[in-house]
Amino acid sequence: MKNVFLETHNIKNLYFGFGQFNFHLIKGLYNSQVEDFRITLHAKDIESLKNEYGDYFNYKKYFSLRRNKQFSIRKKYDLWHSLNQNITIEPYSDIPYLLTIHDVNFIDEVSDDMNHKRNVRFKEKLNRCNSIVYISNYAKISTHKYFDIPKVPEYVIYNGNPVTEVSIADNHQPKIVSKAPFLFSIGEFSERKNFHTLVEMLHFLPNINLIISGKNTTDYADKIKNLIKKYKFEKRVFLTGKISEIDKHYYMQNSLAFVFPSLREGFGIPPIEAMRFGKPVFSSNKTSLPEVCGGQAFYWDNFDAEYMANVFTEGLDSFLKDEKTMSQKSIEVAKSYNWDDTAKKYIEVYKSILKKT
């Protein structure tokens, strides 16, 4: 039986987007119970995966030294799936190869010099490809903008929404709570998340607090912390650090709205997670976000603080005028993104490649 190898070692980083992508795609593949071929997962902690999925998958243990060519995996799988564009582990042999591209943000964040090692490595991945999957049309368009794409089949397969259940125990409460109505956002603290604009917006929303969750040990996080001190917002802006899924759900369910001023997203899962709770979403109009959130979100065209506050106030008023209908529409958008459906689409791509091997 043919064997598809999934380079899934990023599953160890469940607080980050790639780890979540790995986790939910694997779960969707398991739910599909495919019988046409076997799937091998590559991970450091294979015991926990075995405990979860049993013998449905094959497993290969991850070692970081496999980043080096001389220690790379030599088994000739029928298909190798590289689950994101940043992976440095590659097959030793020239075998059928599928690449999922989430974004090419490294052009802006690392270097736009095509001879930079980061861009050279990505071009090498592209040249290996027998097929390419993009997680949004934006990801496809931006990749074509900067790189020569080989003449291979290309697909756009949206991510699923990881939030399927919205029930939270009545007695659950995170360590950090806001006594006043609050806005919520989440993400790793990097310049592209643009969180500082939310802090500045609070000047014009005097009765509303802000909670931001995510890894906040970066230089950009220090910038946010200094801004909070400067404006004396210590009792209005709360940085929780990394949080559990249930805490995230609590904040989404109990917030006034979810706010997401990100400058660059290949897909942007948090806004559709918040929509699953029927919440209004306020987002930048950049990159993939209008494509994913559609007409159900309210968008900022720029990040002037007073302008952002006006968009928020007007948008929230509009949402609340017909809250039941608007909330239901948000839920419908959120439910349209389903990881089981996503996995089935990947399976069809696998089959199309395997037919040619």
Image (tube, rainbow, N blue to C red):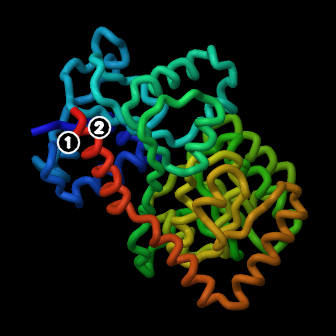
Q: Residue at x 25, y 46 (%)?
A: 351
In the picture, the disc for residue 39 is 1
Up the image or down, 240 lies above or below 123; here it is: below
- In this picture, residue 304 sits left or right of residue 181: right
The residue drawn where x is 49% and y is 39% is 101
Q: Position of residue 216 (x, y in %)?
A: 61, 44
Q: Position of 356 compared to 23: left or right?
A: left
Residue drawn at point x = 65 percent, y = 26 percent: 110
Find the distance from the CA under tag 1 to the CA under tag 2: 7 Å
* Residue 62 percent across, percent down from the top left: 27, 28
Q: Which residue is mark 2?
A: 6
**Could you say where residue 135 lies in the image, as x and y percent from the top left?**
49, 49
The amino acid sitting under disc 2 is Leu
| Lateral position of residue 66 relative to residue 120, left or right | left
Q: Quadrant of the C terminus?
A: top left
Label 2: element kind: strand
Q: Quadrant of residue 317?
A: bottom right
For the image, the number of numbered tags is 2
Q: Nearer the viewer, residue 28 or 235?
A: 28
Would you say residue 16 is visible in this rendering? no
User: Which type of secondary structure does the marked residue at label 1 adopt?
Assistant: strand
Q: What label sits on residue 299 in the rendered view? A: none
Category of crowding for the residue at label 1, using alpha-carbon neighbours closer than 10 angstroms: few (below 14), some (14–19), many (at least 20)? many
Q: Which amino acid type corresponds to the residue marked 1 in the rendered image? A: Ile
- Front residue (pair 271, 81): 81
Q: Nearer the viewer, residue 247 or 322?
A: 322
Where does residue 52 sit, x and y in percent of width and height?
A: 19, 53
Mark 1 and 2 residues: CB-CB less than 8 Å, in contact?
yes
Which quadrant of the structure image shows residue 166?
Answer: bottom left
126 w.r.t. 114: above or below: below
Judge the density around disc 2: few (<14), some (14-19), many (≥20) Cα neighbours within 10 Å.
many
